[in-house]
Image (cartoon, rainbow, N blue to C red):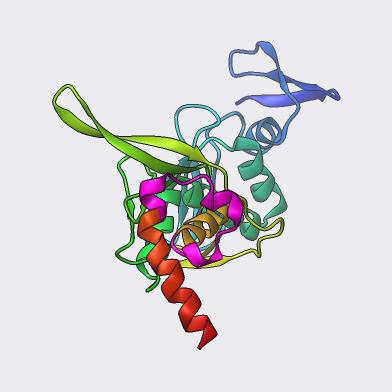
Amino acid sequence: MSMIIAKRDTHIIIRNKRDEYVHRPNDSYNILKYESFGGNRVMHTFDNECKVEETYNERIFNCYYKEQLLQLRNANEICEAIISKDNQLFIDLFKKNFYDLNKAQLLQGLVDNNSTLKGRVRRTKNDDFIVDECFKVDSHANTYVLEHHYIKNTKREKRWRNLCTVVPRTIKKMNIYTKEIGNVEVDQATLRCLTKIFGLIQPHTWDIVIWNQIPNWLKRIYKDELEAFNKRIVK
């Protein structure tokens, strides 16, 4: 069995099973592994919903929550939760990673469940979102406008041009419910994407900066919609 024989500010000294002395970083993972598990795999059950099992590769963990499995490399954060016996710390870490892995699908769900967006927004295989077939919002909340179609190698393709759009400086935090693990917090990047998608399907809210960036053929299409909206406001 391996064991810690000395601790320094930056590292620990371990005597391993072969009676050799080795140095390891002084972090939560190594402290837990060599103080509580004798250098063997770290395994811990928080409750009937949460447990972790280190794989045969150091610092890589199979993590379970509500029958969902994620393989995580957040060794120090996982070990800090075990040392402090804080299952909520582990749950928060699990939910964050679950969200990051499923971000595009969750954003798609928000779009599909909104009556204003449904049928007007579609997701591409690259996880971009196409609005009314003439705008695009990518995963970094960058926006584009369709400049025109063109023929390349006998195939019709689209040419996109950057579109300068802005969102409010402060965006309210938002949680969404998932059937797998319950509520998860939506990150700022996704909220910016969603805000820009909403903005692009409402031409009557555009400022002059956006209007001047779209091509003439698209202005003609939206002109009637803008006029019709303004007439409804006047009435």
Q: Which residue is drawn at 30% across and 41% down?
A: 125
Q: How many labels does the image show?
A: 0
Can you name the residue that lies furthest to the left here? 154
Q: Which of 9 and 20 is in front in this view?
A: 9
Query: Would you say 118 lies left or right of 208 here?
Result: left
Residue 114 lies in the magenta stretch: no
Residue at image coords 50%, 88%: 235
Locate the N terminus and report the quarter of the image it occupies: top right
Q: In this view, does 170 lie to the left or right of 158?
A: right
- Image height check: is 179 above or below 159? below
State yes or no: residue 217 in magenta.
yes
On the image, the x and y values in percent for residue 160 come to: 39, 36
Q: In this view, does 232 lie to the left or right of 153?
A: right
User: Can I make out residue 208 in this image?
Assistant: yes
The residue segment tinted magenta is 201-219
Q: Residue furthest right?
A: 9
Quarter occupied by residue 87:
bottom right
26 vs 151, nearest the viewer: 151
Give the percent coordinates (x, y) of residue 176: 50, 66
55 lies above or below 50: above
